[in-house]
């Protein structure tokens, strides 16, 4: 799939406003980013190839991310 930048961000902002700097955390964040990017890419491509409207599928995926509960707040 082409289009869009699926690379991880250059900096991961921490809750305190400072960038995350721990190598192990950065490694895990990069691995998680690559994994979720691949799953989203596959899901998006499958849906569009099966006839789902591309803009609608983008909204479905955006809504999914927006609905994720915070692990810092009780559900």
Image: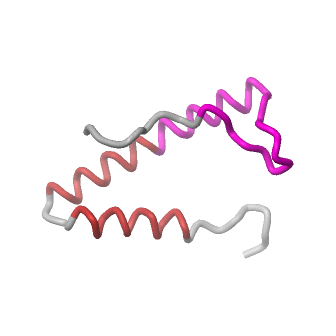
Residue 6 position, x and y percent, is 43, 38
Determine the residue located farthest toward the right in the rendered image: 16
Q: Compared to 21, does 37 lie above or below?
A: below
Q: Quadrant of residue 69?
A: bottom right
Quadrant of the snapshot with the C terminus: bottom right
Residue 38 position, x and y percent, is 39, 40
Q: Compared to 74, does 6 lie above or below?
A: above
Please report the residue visible at 39 percent of the width from the left and 50 percent of the height from the top.
40
Residue 23 position, x and y percent, is 74, 23
Q: Quadrant of residue 61?
A: bottom left
Quadrant of the snapshot with the N terminus: top left
Q: Nearer the viewer, residue 72 or 66?
A: 66
Please report the residue visible at 81 percent of the width from the left and 50 percent of the height from the top.
15
Please report the residue visible at 68 percent of the width from the left and 39 percent of the height from the top.
12
Which span of residues is magenta-colored? Answer: 10-36
Q: Nearer the viewer, residue 71 or 12?
A: 12
Q: Compared to 25, does 74 lie above or below?
A: below
Residue 32 position, x and y percent, is 56, 39
Please report the residue visible at 77 percent of the width from the left and 35 percent of the height from the top.
20
Q: Is residue 16 magenta?
A: yes
């Amino acid at each position: 799939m082409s289009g869009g930048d699926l690379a991880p961000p250059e900096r991961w902002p921490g809750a305190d406003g400072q960038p995350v700097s721990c190598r192990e955390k950065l490694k895990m964040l990069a691995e998680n980013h690559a994994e979720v990017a691949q799953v989203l890419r596959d899901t998006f491509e499958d849906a569009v190839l099966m006839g789902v409207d591309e803009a609608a599928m983008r909204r479905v995926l955006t809504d999914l991310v927006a609905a994720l509960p915070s692990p810092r707040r009780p559900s």
